[in-house]
Image (cartoon, helix red, strand yellow):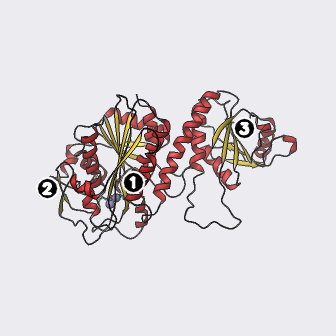
Amino acid sequence: MISCTKKKPEQFVCDMIIYFVRQVEKGAPTCSHNGVKKQIDLAANSGDFTGKEGQEFLFYPDDSMSLKAKRVPVVGLGKKDLSRETFRKAGGVASRQALQGKAGTLLVVVPVELAFQAGDMAECLAEGLVLGSYQFLKYKKEDEGEKPGKIAKISFYSPKHATAVRRGMHQGLISGRCGNQVRNMANEPGNLWTAVDFALYAKSLALKPRLSCKVLGEKELKRLKMGGLLGVNQGSSQPARLVILEYRTGKKVPTLLLVGKGLTFDSGGISLKPGKGMDRMKYDMCGGAAVMAAMEGVAEEQPENVDVVCIVPSTDNMPGPSALKPGDVITIYGGKTVEVLNTDAEGRLILADALAYGVEKFKPDAVIDLATLTGAVVVGLGHHRTGLLTNDDDLSSSLLAAGERSGEPLWRLPLGREYTKQLESNVADLKNIGGPAGGTITAAAFLEEFVGDAVWAHLDIAGTAWDFTEKSYVPKGASGIGARTLLELIRAWK
Ligand code: BES
Ligand code: MN
Ligand code: ZN
C-alpha cells in the first residue's frame, strides 16, 4: 500500500501529488518544484495561502506543468519548530484531501530540503496519512453514485536519504495501521464486539510467526478462581474470556507484559450509570484493543530483544439477575478478597485477576496495563493527556518519551500509602472504591495491590480513548490511543 518511487513527480502518473511547504516570515512559501512554486505564489498573493500549519490549497495542473496528476494539494507546515507531530498532522491534512478528492493513488513529495530528520519526517507523514484516512463505514449502506473515497496506493518520492525514508515510511505504516486496528475494534458496537470476538481476533493474530494464543473460558476461570472477571460477568448473558497472546523470540530476553481492559460494554451493573451518553461505554474495551493491536505491530516488526505477552480480560458489565450487588465480597486470583461497594468500579476487578495471574505466570520484567478506568482522569487531565501511574521511575521516563514521540502524551500522577489507605474495607482485604477524592489514583492504588514486586505502570486512557484532542489525523469516535505508544516503547527497548 505504501512504497518508495525513484520516478520524479513529472514522470509519475497518479490521482494526486502532494507537496509540503513551510510558512516564511515574509512572502510566499518556497517549494522544490518551480511550477508548484508559481501556483503557491498565486495563492499567496491572493491571500488564500500562507503555509500556516493545517492550511492547504489545491490546484489543477495544466499541460504546461508536466505533472501527470489531476489535483495537486499543497499543505502548510507552519513556521514554528518542526516536530514529528507537525508531519503527522500534515499527513492527516493530506489524507483528508485525498478522501475528499476521491484520489486512489497518491504521490507524496517528501520535503527533505527541510532541516529535519528525513526518516522521522517520512515516518510521521506515513503515519498521519494512514491514520487520517481512517473511516468506519461498515454499518452504513453504500450510497449509489456517492462512493466514499479510498486510498489504494501511496508512493513516497524523496531525492535524498532513500534508506532513512524507506525505513521511516515502513515504520509509520505499521504504527498507523496499529492505531486504525484499535479504532476498528473500538468502534464496533457492544452487541457485535464481545469477549468472544476478542478471542477470535487473538486467534487470527496467532497465525503470525512467533505468536501464540490461549483463551481461558468459564471452566478455566473457575478453576483458577478468577473471582474478579467472573464476578463482573455474573450479570451478563455473554460468557467471559481471558485472552492471552504471546510473542516469543525463543531467545533469553526480557519479558514485557501488557494488560488491557476489555470491558465490551459498561452499563455500571447494579450501580447503573445514568442514561445520557451511556452508549459511549461501548468504548470501555479500548485498553484491550490497544494491547492487542500493539501485538499485531510487534508480530509485524519481529523485534529480537524482547518477548511480549498480552492479556485481555473481557466481559461486559450488565445488571442481570445474578449480577454482583453492592456489598458483595469476591476473591481475586491469588486469594485477596474485595468488598464490591460500587459495581461500576468493575474495570479494576477484571484487571486485578489479569495482573495477579500474569505476574505470577509470566514473571515479567515490566508490566503495563491500559484501561479506560476512571471518569476522574477526565476531570484531572481533560482529553489531552493519558494518566500515567507507576512504581518505577525508569519505566515512567521510557513511557513519557514514547508517548511524546507518538503524539500521545502522558502525565504522571502519584501513588502512595495515603491513597492505598482509602481502600481499607471493614469486611474484606480491600474495597473497590476509595471515595470521591483522587479517584484515578485510588483506582491505580487498587491495581498496585495485585502486581506484587513487579515493575509496573498503569495508563488511564478514559480521557483519551475517544474525544481525544482534535487533530487532522484523529477521527470522530475511537481515537485508537495506546498501541502506537507501546510500539514506540518496544522499538526503543534496550
Ligand atoms: N469505564 C468507567 C470509566 C469511565 C468513565 C471511562 C467515564 C470513560 C468515561 C469505569 O468502569 C467506571 O465506571 N468508573 C467509575 C469508578 C467509580 C465508581 C469509583 C467512575 O469513574 O465513575
Ligand atoms: Mn464502570
Ligand atoms: Zn468501565
Amino acid of disc 2: Ala
**How far is mark 2 from mark 3, CA to CA?**
67 Å
**How far is mark 3 from mark 1, CA to CA?**
52 Å
Q: Which mark is residue 199?
A: 1
What residue appears at the point 53 percent right and 57 percent down from the top-left corner? Answer: 476
Seen from this angle, which residue lies furthest right?
Answer: 64
Q: Tell me where residue 260 appears, x and y as whole percent.
A: 36, 49
The secondary element bearing badge 2 is classed as loop
What residue appears at the point 65 percent right and 38 percent down from the top-left corner? Answer: 3
Q: Tell me where residue 277 appears, x and y as whole percent.
A: 42, 66
Amino acid of disc 3: Pro
Residue nearest the viewer, comparing 311 with 249: 249
Q: Which mark is residue 29?
A: 3
The secondary element bearing badge 1 is classed as helix
Q: Tell me where residue 54 appears, x and y as whole percent.
A: 63, 47
Q: Quadrant of the N terminus?
A: top right
Looking at the image, residue 14 lies above or below residue 349: above
What residue appears at the point 50 percent right and 47 percent down from the top-left corner? Answer: 179
Amino acid of disc 1: Ala
In this figure, which residue is indicated by the disc labeled 2? Answer: 428
| 3 vs 1, front mark | 1
| 1 vs 2, front mark | 1
The secondary element bearing badge 3 is classed as loop
Q: Quadrant of the C terminus?
A: top left
Q: Tell me where residue 318 appears, x and y as whole percent.
A: 32, 67
Residue nearest the viewer, comparing 109 with 320: 320
